Amino acid sequence: MKSYKITLLPGDGIGPEITNVTQEVLELLSKKFDFQLKLKKMPFGGAAIESDGIPFPDKTLQECKNSDAVLLAAIGDPKYDQLPREKRPETGLLNLRSSLDLFANIRPVKIIPSLTKASSLKEEFVNEVDLVVVRELTSGIYFGEPKGRLKTESGERAFNTMAYTSEEVKRIAEIAFKLAKQRNQKVCSVDKANVLDVSQLWREETILVAKNFKEIDLTHQYVDNAAMQLVRNPSQFDVILTSNLFGDILSDIAAMLTGSIGMLPSASLTNDGPGVFEPVHGSAPDIAGKDIANPIAMLLSAAMMLKIAFNETYAGNHLENVIHEILTEGYRTSDLMSSGEGKEVGCSQMGELLLGKLK
């Protein structure tokens, strides 16, 4: 029997709630499709600050490195905002990405027919949305040096550096083009090459990579225009390739096309080692413990993990199909309720509905 080792990082806020639902579902799926899962929860983010004094303990890093995949829920809480930057939960997340060299973030955005009314846009604008944001994840302005804050005669000065090398651009561009070959053969590279030197390099290197993928239609958009186009005509996009900062922003805009950021999964991948699979949404500490969180993005992230990390395609597809079936039947967490339509359920009840259909 095949066996896979998964490190679970429940994190903060609603993280433990959606992790518990996802763990129960994964355990049932493993029995149904005849494979074994070894699941181990480790402290991360604010939870690790409370238990270990730092957001990303070495024991958690080692457990992640020794796993076949990492399933992360969410981290962060305003109560940690006053801590020094290096001790905040978000720094732990950046360290996780850099430590595992998770340079490629894959964020699919596909409308579910039963949820078109939940979108913030009119149905006719979103009913054909099926795109993927490919975001570079371990370089750019979040990691660039120098950075910091200085005292000057005229007051304090803060600065960050957006930096990319040719190789960093090439490897993420290759991921986007290979993905486009499996889809509709279109890549839109998003930059700000009209004003940023780093974006000029980004565009030049992307064009060079495109020469090896002659069947792919490559276009370019400035990030401000791309943001506008996502809400003006989102169905024009197939694969969006972009940098760390721009991808962070654009993927959240794209998330709302589906009606809720609570619906979108993601995969952060490397060329050699375990990937990290996580929902796009945050920790939502304001609703933590109220049993109203939407676990679907975490569950869809688990489905991505099953298919990408373990090649358990049938199990991943089965989970996705059951989620769609439940949504088609009208069940909704509070974030998906539009105009009072649907049968509102909580986090744990959504899990129970899934378990009932998966058996």
Image: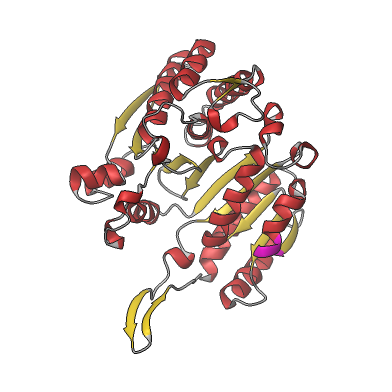
Which residue does the image show at 27% across and 57% down from the upper left? 87
Would residue 186 be seen by someone viewing this image from the given angle? no
User: Quadrant of the rendered structure where residue 283 is?
Assistant: top left
In the depicted view, which residue is nearer to us: 146 or 80?
80
Q: Assess whether residue 316 is covered by the magenta stretch.
A: no
123 is higher (above) or lower (below) than 137 = above
Residue 237's spot in the image, x, y percent?
Answer: 73, 50
User: Quadrant of the rendered structure where residue 38 is?
Assistant: top left
In the depicted view, which residue is nearer to us: 101 or 45?
45
Which residue does the image show at 56% across and 56% down from the upper left? 249
Judged left or right of residue 351, residue 203 is right
**Name of the residue lying farthest toward the front:** 340
279 is higher (above) or lower (below) than 83 = above
Judged left or right of residue 319, residue 87 is left
**Name of the residue lying farthest toward the right:** 124
In the depicted view, which residue is nearer to us: 306 or 115?
115
**Name of the residue lying farthest toward the bottom:** 153
Residue 33's spot in the image, x, y percent?
Answer: 49, 17
Task: Provide the residue span drawn in magenta.
Answer: 221-225
Judged left or right of residue 163, residue 13 is left
Q: Assess whether residue 222 is covered by the magenta stretch.
A: yes
Quadrant occupied by the N terminus: top left
